[in-house]
Amino acid sequence: MRPPSPSIPEKEFLFSALKESLRLDGRLPLEIRTPTFKFGEELGWVECSLGKTRVLAQVDGKMVKPQPERPFEGTITIVSEISPMASTEYEIGRPSDEEVTITRMLDKVLRRSDAVDKESLCVLAGQRVWHISLTLHFLADAGNLLDCACLAGIVALKHFRRPDIEVIGDEVTVHEPTERAPVPLAIHHTPFCFTFAFFPDATTPPVVDPSHLEQRLSAGLVSIALNAQKEICVLQKLGGVPLGTDDILRLVDVAVGKAKEMHNLVEAQLREDWAGRKVEVR
């Protein structure tokens, strides 16, 4: 059952506040919620939070036969389904338009952008390759599920370690983590997604990382996925708000700055978690 639409007083209050560059949670129009990460005992288990929006990402790996048309590349699959646990707006077995959009965008940002080097997943050409599976569980939707899911997915891929292997002839030996240190995935680049919400009144400034109410009352969304090296992976526009070239370039400039900050934050969190694990082993 879908929740009721926002009331007229809610709409008027939000729009009047946004016209004065004020947001209900106290943020500036171009300020994102500070992400927090919770790492599990298993490598590749990450829970990411943007405010009250929470997504759990888990990465697993196993050896399989490669696809006949790509004998030198491993495979990556992304599994995601939004259940009513995240919000009453979602139903089991009946994907909403937003769910379809999120699923497609995740595939473009995390898999088709070649963030992970697929050739490095090859063990024996034409015989054995690694199959990396990324599973995303949407725990709570307080707005901007897409950015939170993309962030959780890429951090989980960077956090994951596959078992070290030894190849002698056609024999493959998989070493336990107690014998040899696990090996991280070869990551080409680290894409981050930033979503901007536009509103019916052209004089209202756009906001980044929209809350649930802002997203529902927006007239259009622009999602930009890029890395800290200023390389744009995906640019997606939803809604009927007309935007000029200068408008898009301004959004890209904002996203570039946010991507650099996010990259530094993610690397610091991963280093801190890895250092803690080394202390536990000792």
Image (tube, rainbow, N blue to C red):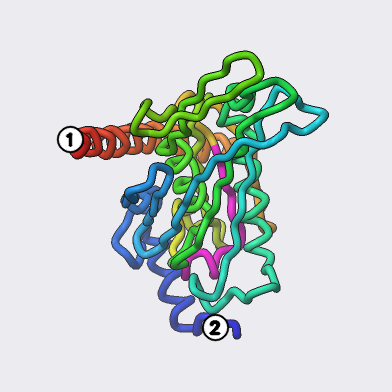
- Mark 2: few, some, or many residues within 10 Å (few <14, many ≥20)? few
Evaluate if marks 2 and 1 touch, with contact meaning CB atoms under 8 Å apart. no
- Residue 216 part of the magenta-drawn span: yes
Disc 2 versus disc 1: nearer the observer: 1
**What percent of the width, then of the height, locates residue 282?**
17, 33
C-alpha distance separating marks 2 and 1: 48 Å
Measuring 63% from the left and 14% from the top, which residue is drawn there?
A: 169
Residue that carries the numbered disc 1 in the rendered image? 279
Q: Secondary structure at mark 1?
A: helix
- Identity of the amino acid at label 1? Val
Quadrant position of the N terminus in the picture: bottom right
Q: Earlier in the sequence, mark 2 or mark 1?
A: 2
- Residue 89 part of the magenta-drawn span: no
Q: Is residue 177 above or below residue 86?
A: above
**What percent of the width, then of the height, locates residue 220?**
61, 58
Q: Is residue 20 above or below residue 270?
A: below
Report the magenta residues as a range: 212-225
Q: Secondary structure at mark 2?
A: loop
Measuring 75% from the left and 24% from the top, which residue is drawn there?
A: 126
Q: Is residue 118 above or below residue 93?
A: above
Name which quarter of the figure residue 221 lies in. bottom right
Measuring 37% from the left and 26% from the top, which residue is drawn there?
A: 180
**What percent of the width, then of the height, locates residue 271?**
28, 32
Q: Give whichever of 149, 229 is nearer the camera.
A: 149
| Disc on res. 3 | 2
